[in-house]
Image (cartoon, grey):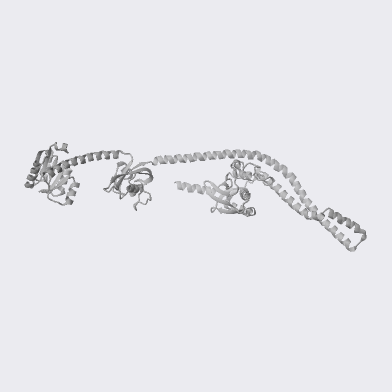
Amino acid sequence: MEAETKRSFRILIVEDDQIDVKLLKRQLSQSRLPVTKVEQCECLKEALEQLATEQYDVVLLDMNLPDSKGLETLTAISSKYPHLTIINVTGSSDEGTALRALANGSQDYLIKCRFDPYVLSKSIQYSVERKKNELALLESTGKLNAMLEAISDHMTIIDVNLSIIRANNTAKATFGDDIVGKKCYEVFHHDKNGCMKNHCAIKEALVDGKVHQWESEVTDKNGQKRQFCSTANVVFWDQQGKPEAVIEISRDVTQTKEAQKNLVKANKELEKANREMKMMQSQLVQNEKLASIGQLAAGVAHEMNTPVGFVASNFVTLRKYIVRFQAMFGEYEDLINEIKKHKNKKYEDKIKAIEQSWKELRMDFIQEDIQSLFNESSEGFERVTSIIQNLRDFSHIDKGEDFDEYDLNKAINTTLKVAKNEIKYNAEIQTDLCETLPVWCNKGQVNQVFLNILVNAAQAIKSKEQKEKGNILIKTYARDKWGVCEISDDGTGIPPHILNKIFDPFFTTKPAGKGTGLGLSVSYDIIVNKQNGQLLVESQVDKGTKFTIKLPLSRKEQEEKILVETSTDG
């Protein structure tokens, strides 16, 4: 302030009361303030003319003049000469008027007869300094505004009421020229009912005063959805140190997000293609195995079929002969009993010899056991016949060519009835079936696959030798072009080192005589090669196994799905 007193001041007094003018001049002369020029005007018009021709540092202004009253006097001068320091010197002690004067361009407000030369001197010095700082602040603000407008990102300032009080041109271009004064949720989300967000970074910044960053989806003035990456920071604080407003700077990352989404989609498609390629390679390898083994199976089935056929035929004939022998034995027994009744001594020795031979040859036991032998032999022939049929199925002998629409759920229910006795003692069945699931397939072959897998599941649970029953879950649904059936069990599971072998022909983990190793191979051949589907397996030791069967949806179902997807995309 000492440096300020060395400068000279040019002062214009705007006052129509000559006594007050003389008092002001006397106080100026008595102060230590260096004044080089003091002039006086009695009305507003004269003051404006004087200011137009002369330069002044300070105006001592009475707001009530002959041609102007109140704030109009102040604003008439401050609006035309914004760089001028104005001090109101008035007889009114109304604080409201004083505050309004300070808000409309005055640097100080002095009440007549209540100040001395020292107070007047300090008021002039402080007001000039305050004006200089105000102008510097305006200049800085102008530069700041220019910088904000130069920012390519969206900038808004939002107060505690969530109203936008400032926005740069970028924000206005995106959300509209009239966004200042509107609520942020109304501008960014087109919602006039209030901010319903549970976690709003703007609200949080206004509470804790910290910097917050977030990503969000907003709606521009054209109703288009955009992705923004935003930062909010407090810029204004009240006298108690509480946040009053935050500045939000947002970058439009819509194109970046779209590019990332496309990249993720491309990666997923690449991964899918890679998986399909690996699956195709695996299928080709499996098909090669099946083709080579199939030729062998066809020959074996053919060679076994002939001898088994005539043995089976001879076995039927032998059963007829045994029946006749048993009938003849009965007649001999009746004859012996008849002879015993007549007590013919001539035949007694012969009868005793026959009875002794009957006992020694254990004919009673043979007659009883011969039926068990035939029953066991019949079961053996059925097993051999079943193996031959599996070989025939595996080698495409008697291949069924009849394809039709078939409800996969019906196939499940039909197979469960057939396999009921095999399953009911070992597992509980749980189903989660969709309403209908029509697929395009050969009914008999698909039923055979379900039977193989369900029986395997029951046997896997049984092999755990647990007291309680296990569980088999069957789930069906449609996905993409497939009708899908998942069959899961909580059996023993399959070790990882043999999981890729379970579809190999003649591979089995069952003890000798308990399995042929053809069930899953035949199932794979039916689903993949004959039905153009997929057969997948997942397994964990001691936790269980899940087989996933995928069959092409019926032609009508596929057409309807394509229509739905097309209309949704459109």
| Quadrant including the N terminus | top left
Work out whether residue 255 or residue 402 is closer to the camera in this orientation and state it: 255
Lateral position of residue 248 relative to residue 276, left or right: left
Work out whether residue 443 or residue 418 is closer to the camera in this orientation and state it: 418
Q: Residue furthest bottom?
A: 341
Residue 309 in view, yes or no: yes
Instruction: Report x, y in % for residue 45.
Output: 11, 44
Q: In the displayed structure, would residue 54 be above or below residue 198? A: above
| Tally of numbered tags | 0
Residue occupying the point 87% across, 59% down: 336
Residue 413 in view, yes or no: no
Work out whether residue 6 or residue 146 is closer to the camera in this orientation and state it: 6
Residue occupying the point 54% across, 38% down: 277
Residue occupying the point 15% across, 41% down: 125
Lateral position of residue 300 relative to residue 217, left or right: right
Work out whether residue 60 or residue 74 is closer to the camera in this orientation and state it: 60
Instruction: Report x, y in % for residue 47.
Output: 11, 43
Instruction: Report x, y in % for residue 414.
Output: 61, 53
Q: Residue furthest right?
A: 346
Which of the 4 image quadrants contains residue 80?
A: top left
Which of the 4 image quadrants contains residue 156?
A: top left
Instruction: Report x, y in % for residue 333.
Output: 85, 58
